[in-house]
Amino acid sequence: MPITWELRDEDRELFANELDDFVPDRVYDAHAHLYRELSWLGEAPAHVSAGPSDVSLETYREQMDWIVPGREVHGLHFPFPPGDGNMDNDAANEWVSEQVRKDPLARGQFLVRPTDDPEWVRDEVRRLGLRGLKPFASYSGVEPVGEAQLPSYLPESLVAVANDEEWSITIHLVRPRGVADPSNVHWLRTYCERYPRANLILDHSARGFNPYHAIEGLQQLTGYSNLWIDTSVACPPLATIAALRCLGPRRVLYGSDFFCSHIRGTNVGLNDGFAWLDEDLSVWEGNPWIPTMRPVLVGLENLRAVKAAFWALRMSDSEIERYFWGNAAELLRL
Ligand SMILES: [Zn+2]
């Protein structure tokens, strides 16, 4: 996915016109990647060469000024996943550890492989001062990766350790129908019920890029106090609506998915799938009715969708504040 890595007038205008009155002064970002180029053993992904190659806590905060200008930002951080399995995970985790130690309100999750020994993981996470796990389906070994079932990248033995330690686990669901997939529903219910002190966070509004999947799946996942949603980079408002209605406003968290927040474009549900409309697609070339189309940063499109969802559900100011801060404060025991 191309990334231009620049802030444009249309980004500033959209925030000023539509978001400045919605985003509070203080924001907790429950999904923000920190990384440095050296962690990749081969060639680093394109965004690393397009933007800052080493994303420290300070660099991340400077960059977040593009999405939430002037706001105080703290976050839950983890490495960025490898492209082709070519990452030094130890170095990537060390980097996140070094960065989150700079801020008492920052938290970190450990990039974990399903083959990692659970007791080694427990010791490493403690040693690094992290408090959670970040699994990725790309480590499952399943081909194609989009078919991976949850235990293939998040084995039960790791959830058991997270339960002992009261950690969070941020999960990017896969399988074609995302959270509506019966296997995903089954394993999420199983883990939530067996491990009530492990807090599971479903990112991207439970991968709600197709919001109809979110509606269908999240209705089967209500009533768990240890199940949370981060809304990062999911641009359909209906995805946030599904999260708020099914899990309740006390379980939904703001997340930027930095650096994905800095991709220019949006994403939409299409039939039984979804598409990312990034800047180089012809869809932005305009038409006789709208001759000039100017895509903005995905992080801004996401915030606008969230604002629309809160408006549609008549959410209160205190619920908005909880979304941007209070829910994360409770979950992460800030
Ligand atoms: Zn992410």
Image (tube, rainbow, N blue to C red):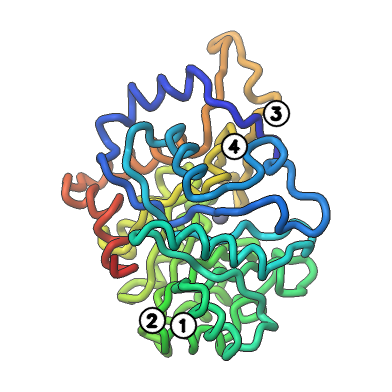
Tell me what residue is drawn at x 48 percent, y 19 percent. 10
Give 77 or 252, whichever is nearer the viewer: 77
> Residue 263, labelled with which disc?
4
Label 1 – label 3 distance at C-alpha: 42 Å
Which residue is denoted by mark 3 in the rendering? 281
Q: Amino acid at mark 1?
A: Ala
Q: Amino acid at mark 2?
A: Glu
Q: Position of residue 287 (x, y in %)?
A: 61, 13
Crowdedness of circle 4 by 10 Å Cα count: few (<14), some, many (20+)?
many
Label 3 – label 2 distance at C-alpha: 44 Å
Label 1 – label 4 distance at C-alpha: 32 Å
Q: Is residue 48 left or right of residue 256?
A: right
Of the four image quadrants, the one with ligand 1 is bottom right
Mark closer to the chain start, 3 or 4: 4
**Quarter of the figure with the N terminus:** top right
Q: Position of residue 300 (x, y in %)?
A: 45, 34
Q: Is residue 263 left or right of residue 148?
A: left
